[in-house]
Each structure stands twice: as C-alpha cells, then as structure tokens.
Image (tube, rainbow, N blue to C red):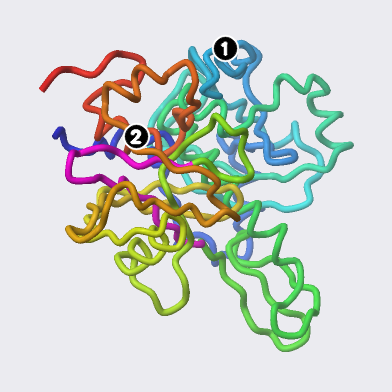
Amino acid sequence: MSPFPLSALPLSRHAIDRDHVSRSRPALFDELWDDPTTRVLALWKGRALLTAESVEAATPAADGWGSATGIAALELLPVERVTSALVRVYLGRTLVATATEPAGSAVVLEVLTDAAAAELEPDEARWGNLRTVATALSDRDAGLFTEALAIANWHASHTHCPRCGTPTVVEQAGWVRRCFEDGSEVFPRTDPAVIVTVLDRDDRLLLGSNAMWEQSRYSLLAGFVEPGESFESAVEREIYEEAGIRVVDAEYKGSQPWPFPASVMVGFTARLAEDQDPAALDPDGEEILDLRWFARDELWEAREQVILPGRSSIARALIEDWYGGSLDEPPVAP
C-alpha cells in the first residue's frame, strides 16, 4: 500500500509563520497598521473574501463531491479597506511571495458584521466556504483560511468566562480571552476526533451512513476522543459503539484540522479482530443507520449510487490511500 499522502491533505497545508512571540506586544496592531505590507483576511459567517477571478472556482463541482475545481485565491486587503470588525486576530507572517504580497507580510483576521461585509463586498459569490474551496487554494491561502476559521469559531463560543459567566476581553493579539471578574485566562481549544479505516480479513473497507446525511452518503466511522482516553482506545470504543464490532492494531496515519467548528481529525487504520464475524455489523441506530463492507471493485461499481466524502476531508484521503489511487479512476488490479 502506498504511503499516506500527508502533504496532500488540503487543510493541513500552510505557508505561514504564526509568529507567536509577537502576540504579547501591547502595540502590535498599531505597528502592523503602520506597515504598508500588512494585509487583512476578511471573514463573514465563516466565509472568506475571494478574488473576483475565484468565483468560478468557488462553485462546487457538478460531480456531487462538494469540492471546487480550478484555482482560487483569498483577497487579502490593505488595512484601510476594512473599517470595523467584531474580532481581530494576528495570524502571522507569510512564508512565500505572491504577485500582490511579499514574503513576510503580516496577515490579520477581521471577523465582520453583516453590515461591514455588505459594505466591503455585497456580491455573496465572492465569499467562499472553506469546505468547497480548500482544494483550489494555494498552501498559503489554505493554511490562512483554516487558521482564521478555527480561531474565529473559538472566539464566537467563548465570549463569556466558563467559570462564572462574566464577559471576556480579547488579549494577546486575539489568542487569549481574559475574564473581567477574576482575571483568569481562556486559551483556544481544539477537540480531537479519531477517524478510522476499518478493514476486514479480506481487506474490505467499512463505511457507514450517518443519520444526519442523505441515505446514499457514506464515510469512515469517526468520533470524539473522551476525557482520559488515548487515541487508540477511542478507535476501539467508537467502532464498537457505532458498528458493534471489535477492532485491533490501531495504527496512526495522519491528521488534519477540521474547523467545523473546532476539531482536529486524527486518522487511523484498524483491523477486524480475529474472533469477530464481518457479517455481525450492528449500527447503533442513532448516529449510524447503515453499514457496508466494500471491496475496491465494489466501491467503484457503486460510484453512481454512493456519495463519498469531499476532497477537502481526511476521510477522502484515507479512503483513497486504501483504494490505491484516485476514486475517479477504477482500481488498479493487484
């Protein structure tokens, strides 16, 4: 089996130095606003402003995969273009040069109100969704968008102190919130979830259909890591809870941030335990409604009936790693 393509995971790509040492400078934003190379990444309702040329690429492909085709780019703005924001966060400095920004340009996230977004760009087609455009963005823009969306989602859910409910104030260039009442600091958090390529003794892949999806959509089984639990233990527990079978030999494959709203997906492979019957699948009936084993040729033959994960997800990459290539092509005979 080919090595897992870590570098190909759309949301794991980056070309930005997060420059954490600068976050504590009290006058950081004043310094950045005096620098003509500083750029603003505008975010509205979880969507980022794209260049006018990106509109076509930001349209989901017609093949049902929900991913963009072509090339897309973020519209990084001079600071004077954005007049107000709900939240401001220093994202870091770029590591690569483009036609419009030199390497080392500072990038600041500004989360906009409806009114500010409409004033800046009323054409909603210019505001791109990360799930859709991730595969069409450069490494720099994919990394910036992912970082921006994750930290913006954290701010939206931590406006008040988790201890006493007092409003919090933003500090450390957007990377800390402090309670007005007791001075305690709240730092950004990410919720880890395992996602698993489960294989039986015939190397068939297990896919499940979630209750929240249309009936024809299938993906790998996944679930959040519980407190006091290792990733490997989470793999075994989640598969048993959702499919009623025991798995062994959990092996780490790679990870990808998934800021919808605040996760990191940790990919594993695992195999059906020797004493388990592949036919004894038992979907939990609440989260998972259907479970199916697929050989590679069976997955190809079912391509018109089964909707698989989009190209921006680690699930897609894990499935293609098992499949041995692109799901757009028939499997190569062993």
Check residue 204 for magenta coloring.
yes
Q: Where is residue 2 in the image (x, y as percent from the top left)?
A: 15, 33
Residue 229: which disc? Answer: none
Residue 62: which disc? Answer: 1
Where is 220 relative to 311, above or below? below
Report the amino acid beneath label 2: Ala
In the displayed image of the protein, which residue is found farthest to the bottom?
182
Most foreground residue, 306 or 290: 290
Which residue lies at the image location 31% right of the left edge and 21% below the top edge? 326
Q: Which of marks 1 and 2 is nearer the N terminus?
A: 1
* Quadrant of the image containing the N terminus: top left
Report the amino acid beneath label 1: Ala
The residues tagged by marks 1 and 2 sit, at their Cα atoms, a distance apart of: 20 Å
> Mark 2 — residue?
317
Crowding around mark 2 (Cα neighbors within 10 Å: few <14, some 14 to 19, many 20+) is: many
Which residue lies at the image location 29% right of the left edge and 52% below the top edge? 268
Main secondary-structure element of the magenta-colored stretch: strand
Check residue 219 for magenta coloring.
no
Which residue lies at the image location 33% right of the left edge and 47% below the top edge? 279
Where is 180 relative to 219, above or below? below
Quarter of the image for residue 234 reads bottom left
Q: Position of residue 51 (x, y in %)?
A: 62, 19
* Quadrant of the image containing the C terminus: top left
Which residue lies at the image location 68% right of the left edge and 41% below the top edge? 46
Where is 194 relative to 136, above or below? below
Q: Is residue 275 left or right of residue 284?
A: left
Q: What stretch is highlighted in magenta?
A: 191-208
Q: What element carries label 1?
A: loop
Most foreground residue, 213 or 178: 213
Most foreground residue, 143 or 237: 237
